[in-house]
Image (spheres, rainbow, N blue to C red):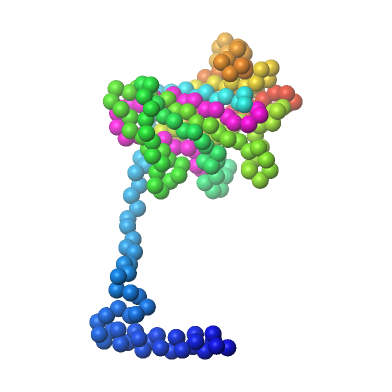
Amino acid sequence: MRQAVLALLLLSTAPIAAAAAAQSGQPAASVPANFTRAEPLAKVDTIPAARDVAFPGTIRLHVDVTDLDRRIIRVKETIPVAEAGHMVLLYPKWLPGAHSPSGAINKVAGLTIHAGGKRLDWVRDTLDVYAFHVDVPAGATSLDVEFQFVSPTAEGQGRTVITPDMASIQWIATSLYPAGYYVRNIPVEATLTMPQGWTAATSLRPATGSAPNGSPTGGDRRSLTRPCPTTSWSIRRRLPAAISANGS
């Protein structure tokens, strides 16, 4: 009861205090004079808009899925650059068939970028967490990008893509691409390293002579060199003891 009476008194005296403050030219007591008011700022988009122009080169993408115990997918990319200066790399955000920005950016870890053997600093965009800014040094012809995709290891972490017997790898989840181009204009040459003895199947055309061979990670390596837009590749389903791919 006492709380209700106190609230009523406060409400009844508020108009009186506001009127007195208005007559004196001073702000109401409920808003101290040293308070500042937030002012809206215009949104500044620093990500180049996509254009329907050809990308100058072919991205070389290598995906390693041999770490079955930790279910970590290791990614290496070589991304050609046309000139020195500011560049933005994007992680796929809007996926075909999805109705929201559902790209698994929360699974990306350990991003490093090098040019000519020198490590470059990168900065995440202040508005879009799917964008990474980097300054390309003079004389560089490509960026060497590495990161890990830490796939789910337990229920509640997302869709399981790796088990001891199978892998379901979506290329769209294991690549970065340069902003400023329609992804359909960015050719990619992909190479997959899988556990020893596993078999890959894909609708992408394998490179001539890409039969399995011993790789540094102890797995089998297959090359898929038919240029394809990054966002159209996926590995969906497998038969027992094999990887299956369905790149569209």
- As drawn, is 205 to the left or to the right of 55? right
Give 55 or 71, whichever is nearer the viewer: 71
> Would you identify the image quadrant in which residue 69 lies?
top right
Image quarter for residue 106? top right
Give residue 8's position: percent from left, percent from top.
49, 88
Tell me the magenta residue range: 68-95
Viewer-nearest residue: 49 or 217: 217
Q: In this view, does 239 lie to the left or right of 211?
A: right
- Quadrant occupied by the C terminus: top right
* Image x and y of residue 57, in percent: 40, 23
Please tell me which residue is depicted at 47% across the width and 22% down the height of the picture. 60
For the N terminus, the image quarter is bottom right
**Residue 83 lies in the magenta stretch:** yes
Compared with 72, 105 (above or below) is below
Q: Where is residue 16 in the image (x, y as percent from the top left)?
A: 36, 89
Q: Residue furthest front?
A: 2
Residue 242, above or below 11: above
Name, please, the residue furthest toward the top. Answer: 209
Residue 168 in sight in this render: no
Q: Is residue 8 visible?
A: yes
